[in-house]
């Protein structure tokens, strides 16, 4: 594997041989060292069922090898060819209205289909046997963004697989009836044949049934990955196998559970073009990728050199933005920066998507920035393998994401990912790094943090509550958002008054949820402002929480809005509303202060992103990314790697520019 990977998705089957040779020349020019090859090449290498043609692939891999470019070889299972749909009509994807969707796009298959899994396995097997020991092939890339379009299939095969999954989870129908609370609305099942995938129903569907279906569906797409991964491990031992995640943007794959299934966590990230602060969303996705990787280095498998083509308004990246984006991912633990795609398509769905080689070729700004990025990555290659550790953690999990947003809750306006990202952004703005880690966490892991954030953690498991309780009793600081601690894994209310599972730890009772009308706002007596949500809360007895601030108006006027509870040696705080961004920022700033967390370096925060990576041998690097339109100063010392200058105490970074400093005190990299 290259030190810092640099390259992109390479889809040579769109081009003829002359272009392949030109591609290698350009890759060398830019310093590309890794390409993800053949992600959608199924119909190229298996044009008809069991008729394989590897001649083109052989040639491309040989050219890449001669050119010194390593290959992350893909299995093409994300896009079965038209012959597959014709041969296996029952393997087509069926939507929630029971419509079988045709081919002509990608991912048009049912993940539970045995025919799909078998045929995907056949082509993976042929690739692994043919190229598994090839010196150019350094990594395997299974499918693409698994489940992206087709996680929730509603065909009869999926329904049968769902019943088997439920039998394994609940044992018998009594167990299922209990877990799903089927006593309500006369939903008791008396035979397994009656149990269906939740699809279109006249009224609302049973929420525990939906939650189980989401778990099942995530497990099914994971099973597709595992089938191929095991084949690749068998025939290509020692080479890492991965599949590219969409951490932070895709809801339906439980990546927290997938982290241990891949040999290297890889992630795709695309900026939300309409958000002028999109770099904070980038940081969230990167911090979550690192959390899923349990703190180890991961790899940014895809981002864009400039505009995408699938958002309503696809704004181009401004000069320097692509470099900042790339280094922001690397700052947060990615060992490289890769793109979709190497060469801009001249036909098909994505021809208006930017690429490393634009249609206009070497004279374009984008190409010149790609070449610059290649040079920058070579200069900072020594950071590869180092890690990032925040002093603040936010717990994150997909079951909460699904459960909180399932509908039938007090307000549609309280959304899981929106809350998490808003809290994360408030930390980012203080120049502090926040690890986003799976909620299924031990007290031991939590004890490394000074502050733990738990925004709207609706579904609380005994394991998480135990870990949080031990963490706080051991001296940790915890900040909990509204509508937390309420239900178990089956979406059943925890016993006793709200907030059920977190009541003891928070030392308070929530008497009522009082969501606001659309657009309404409220104020606290401390001056902070909120919207969307309020709760009627009271502290529990004399040992309970104390009130820091009260609602000045709104549906809970006069009642506590912010509370703190000393538990053991630590502190658990509760926010009973959803704060506006500036108030959230003030709240988080106070919590950081109280927990003794300062910014990564003086000067960090407010659009100046500063992140530290540290190597086992004690070397450390500061990544400084200036997202503002002004020149900024950050206090640090060491050697700035891009300009090779010595920094003594003060680093100046121009508007929109970046710097990477090997900090003084670090043993010289040589
Ligand atoms: C990703 C996908 C790529 C490409 C890209 C465009 O989600 O993996 O194949 O479609 O989006 O932004």
Image: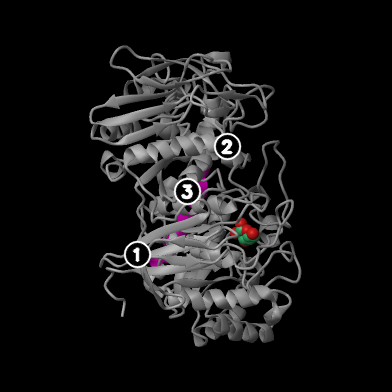
Determine whether the residue tagged by mark 1 lies in a helix, strand or loop: loop
Q: Is residue 5 shown above or below 559?
A: below
Q: CA distance from mark 2 to mark 3?
A: 43 Å
Residue drawn at the location 23% of the way across and 28% of the way down: 568
Q: Circle 3 sits on which residue?
A: 428
Q: Which region shows up in magenta?
A: 217-234
Q: Circle 2 sits on which residue?
A: 159
- Residues packed near mark 1 inside 10 Å, few (<14), some (14 to 19) or many (20 plus): many
Determine whether the residue tagged by mark 3 lies in a helix, strand or loop: helix
Q: Where residue 127 sits: x, y (%)?
A: 51, 71
Q: Quadrant of the N terminus?
A: bottom left
Q: Where residue 96 sits: x, y (%)?
A: 67, 37
Q: Circle 1 sits on which residue?
A: 386
- Is residue 104 in sight in this rendering? yes
Q: Is residue 393 left or right of residue 269?
A: left
Determine whether the residue tagged by mark 2 lies in a helix, strand or loop: helix
User: Which mark's residue is nearer the viewer, 1 or 3?
Assistant: 3
Residue drawn at the location 26% of the way across and 65% of the way down: 618
Could you say which is closer to the camera, residue 79 or residue 515?
515
């Amino acid at each position: 594997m290259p030190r810092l990977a640099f390259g992109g998705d390479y889809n040579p089957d769109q081009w003829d041989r002359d272009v392949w040779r030109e591609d290698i020349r350009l890759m060398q020019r830019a310093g590309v060292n890794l390409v993800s090859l053949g992600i959608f090449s199924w119909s190229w290498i298996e044009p008809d069922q069991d008729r394989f043609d590897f001649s083109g692939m052989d040639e491309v891999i040989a050219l890449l090898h001669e050119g010194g470019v390593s290959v992350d070889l893909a299995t093409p299972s994300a896009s079965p060819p038209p012959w597959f749909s014709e041969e296996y009509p029952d393997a087509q994807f069926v939507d929630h209205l029971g419509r079988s969707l045709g081919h002509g796009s990608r991912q048009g298959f049912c993940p539970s289909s045995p025919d799909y899994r078998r045929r995907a396995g056949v082509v993976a097997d042929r690739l692994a046997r043919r190229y598994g020991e090839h010196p150019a092939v350094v990594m395997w890339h299974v499918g693409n963004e698994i489940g992206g379009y087709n996680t929730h299939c509603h065909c009869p095969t999926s329904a049968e697989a769902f019943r088997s999954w439920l039998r394994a989870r609940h044992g018998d129908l009594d167990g299922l009836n209990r877990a799903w609370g089927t006593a309500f609305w006369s939903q008791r099942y008396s035979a397994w044949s009656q149990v269906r995938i939740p699809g279109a129903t006249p009224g609302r569907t049973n929420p525990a049934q939906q939650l189980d279906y989401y778990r099942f569906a995530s497990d099914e797409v994971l099973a597709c990955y595992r089938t191929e991964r095991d084949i690749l491990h068998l025939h290509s031992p020692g080479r890492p196998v991965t599949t590219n995640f969409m951490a932070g943007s895709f809801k339906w794959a439980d990546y927290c559970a997938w982290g241990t299934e891949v040999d290297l966590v890889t992630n795709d990230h695309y900026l939300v073009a309409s958000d002028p602060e999109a770099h904070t969303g980038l940081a969230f996705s990167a911090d979550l990728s690192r959390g899923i990787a349990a703190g180890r280095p991961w790899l940014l498998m895809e981002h864009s050199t400039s505009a995408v083509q699938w958002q309503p308004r696809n704004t181009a990246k401004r000069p320097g933005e692509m470099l900042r984006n790339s280094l922001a991912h690397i700052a947060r633990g990615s060992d490289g920066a890769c793109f979709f795609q190497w060469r801009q398509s001249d036909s098909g769905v994505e021809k208006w998507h930017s690429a490393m080689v634009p249609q206009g070729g070497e004279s374009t700004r984008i190409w010149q920035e790609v070449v610059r990025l290649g040079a920058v990555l070579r200069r900072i290659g020594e950071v590869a393998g180092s890690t990032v550790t925040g002093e603040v953690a936010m717990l994150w999990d997909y079951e909460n994401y699904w459960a909180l947003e399932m509908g039938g809750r007090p307000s549609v306006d309280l959304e899981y990912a929106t809350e998490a990202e808003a809290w994360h952004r408030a930390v980012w703005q203080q120049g502090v790094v926040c690890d986003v880690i799976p909620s299924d966490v031990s007290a031991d892991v939590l004890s490394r943090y000074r502050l733990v954030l738990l925004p709207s953690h609706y579904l609380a498991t005994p394991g998480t509550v135990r870990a949080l309780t031990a963490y706080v009793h051991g001296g940790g600081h915890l900040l909990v958002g509204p509508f937390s601690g309420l239900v178990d894994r089956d979406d059943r209310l925890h016993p006793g008054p709200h907030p059920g599972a977190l009541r003891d730890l928070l030392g308070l009772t929530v008497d009522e949820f009082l969501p606001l009308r659309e657009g309404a706002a409220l104020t606290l007596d401390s001056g902070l402002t909120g919207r969307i949500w309020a709760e009627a809360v009271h502290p529990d007895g004399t040992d309970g929480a104390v009130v820091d601030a009260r609602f000045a108006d709104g549906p809970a006027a006069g009642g506590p809005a912010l509370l703190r509870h000393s538990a053991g040696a630590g502190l658990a705080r509760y926010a009973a509303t959803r704060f506006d961004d500036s108030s959230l920022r003030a709240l988080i700033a106070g919590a950081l202060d109280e927990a003794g967390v300062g910014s990564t370096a003086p000067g960090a925060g407010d659009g100046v992103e500063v992140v530290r990576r540290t190597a086992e041998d004690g070397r450390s690097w500061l990544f400084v990314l200036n997202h503002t339109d002004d020149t900024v100063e950050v206090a640090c010392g060491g050697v700035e790697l891009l300009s090779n200058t010595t920094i003594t105490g003060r680093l100046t970074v121009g508007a929109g520019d970046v710097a990477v400093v090997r900090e003084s005190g670090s043993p010289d990299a040589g």
